[in-house]
Amino acid sequence: MRLLLHSAHWCQTATAIIALLISTSACAQDEQPWDKQTTGQTSVARLGRVEYQISYRSAGFDHFNTEILIRWQAGQPSTGQQQILYEGIHDRPPARIWGAGRHLCLAMQTCARGSDRCQWHVLAHRYQASSQRFVEVNPSSASCRTPR
């Protein structure tokens, strides 16, 4: 009986250690360093300067995992705000960001598999003062034109 209890305790301990190793490995994977970071700034009407940081790393083949973080000042009194505007995978980094009137535009490329034929995807965001956040809007309703 004592041997059975000892075996059961050992099995539980081993299972806990394996689970810990798996979760630690998954967390370490999420925190991989970025291969490259690009920073810049643009402006949005009625808000002012918006700073951005585009971070990306290889996701395999010709794809890149990307995070776009923006920062701006808002509110009374003015306080620093930040928001992740995009997290995802695209091709041919870096993405492009620019202000167009009251909109913040974002464009990135995706390419057909095994081809150099790529197309731009444009996202438009508008600052919503009530929530102090940028919200996505239909790009055709904004003045965000596809880059050349």
Image: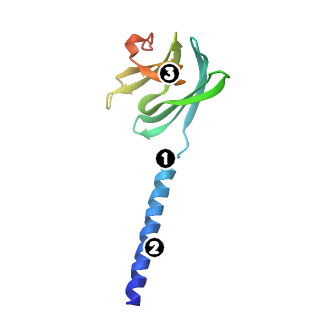
From the image, tell me which residue sits under label 3.
96
What scheme was used to colour the molecule? Answer: rainbow
The foreground one among 92 and 126 is: 126
On the image, the x and y values in percent for residue 131 come to 52, 25
Residue at the image position 42 percent from the left and 30 percent from the top: 91
The secondary structure type at the circle numbered 1 is helix
On the image, the x and y values in percent for residue 13 come to 45, 73
Query: Quick one: label 3 or label 1, which is nearer the N terminus?
Result: 1
From the image, tell me which residue sits under label 2.
13
Q: CA distance from mark 3 to mark 2?
A: 50 Å
Q: Does residue 49 lie above or below 38 as drawn?
A: above
Q: Can residue 123 be seen?
A: no
The secondary structure type at the circle numbered 3 is strand
Q: CA distance from mark 3 to mark 1?
A: 24 Å
From the image, tell me which residue sits under label 1.
30
On the image, the x and y values in percent for residue 130 come to 52, 21
